[in-house]
Amino acid sequence: MSQIFHRSTNLVSRVSIYGAVLIIGALGYALYAIAMSPWYTDQNVKRQQPVPFSHRHHAGELGIDCRYCHTSVEKSSFAGVPPTQTCMTCHSQIWTNSSMLEPVRASYRDDTSLPWVRVNALPDFVYFDHSIHVSKGVGCTTCHGQVAEMALTERAGTLYMSWCLNCHRQPEKFVRDKSEVFNPYYESPSAAKQLELGRKLVKEYKIQSYQHCSTCHR
């Protein structure tokens, strides 16, 4: 019986199969790269705000404690956005004629809220409680990055579930002494010393490695 297909058909078939695998792999990698890029995650992207509030100046240079503005962080799921009255505690006395702060003064005069743009906004189907994290030794900079060095606030992490699970699976790599939770310049010890300290604090603070879906998705 004569050969139906030309001998080159075998080569074409192999090249087609291997080529398809490579194309699918490259496409998958490209999609992963896009999903992890700042273009998609908004990581390290500075948001336009009604007033260019600088954490570098307030928390860094002036040393204002996080809790002065984010008053509910130790007792609520929400850290709290400071009301205009908090801003005016200082700015009714200093920088009173600054044009940059006119939206703050207008907000105070008109008793209206400033339309701040959320930088770290989780989806509605995700539950996150600030109070339980800070009470267990998770520092502000662990999630929010070096805020005291940010002239304009930006998102430090991807906020992906895998990002959260990195800590939930191995909290000993991230926890710190409670006295250092609100320290914007806290420096983690070496990996070995952090593990030693972390394991001690995990026991002392009774930290649970919660990974069940219902922990965050309620």
Image (tube, rainbow, N blue to C red):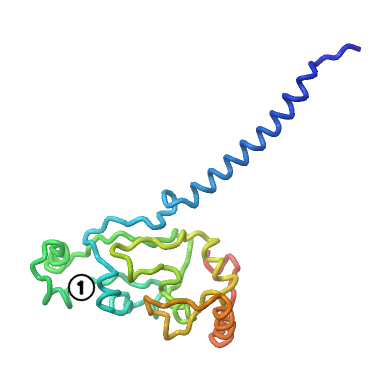
Give 197 or 89, whichever is nearer the viewer.
197
What residue would you read off at disc 1? 87
Q: How crowded is mark 1: few (under 14 residues within 10 Å), some or many (20 or more)?
A: some
Q: Furthest residue to the bottom?
A: 204
How many dots with numbers?
Answer: 1
Residue drawn at the location 26% of the way across and 67% of the way down: 54
Question: Which corner quadrant holds the N terminus?
Answer: top right
Residue 213 horizontal side relative to residue 91, left or right = right
Whether residue 218 can be seen here: no
Identity of the residue drawn at 44% across and 54% down:
41
- Residue at the spot x=45%, y=62% of the render? 157
Query: Residue 151: which quarter of the image?
Result: bottom left
Q: x and y percent of residue 185 in the render?
A: 38, 76
Q: In which quarter of the image is residue 88?
A: bottom left
* Residue at position x 56%, y 71% in the image: 168
Look at label 1 and name its amino acid.
Cys
- In x, y percent, where is residue 23? 61, 36
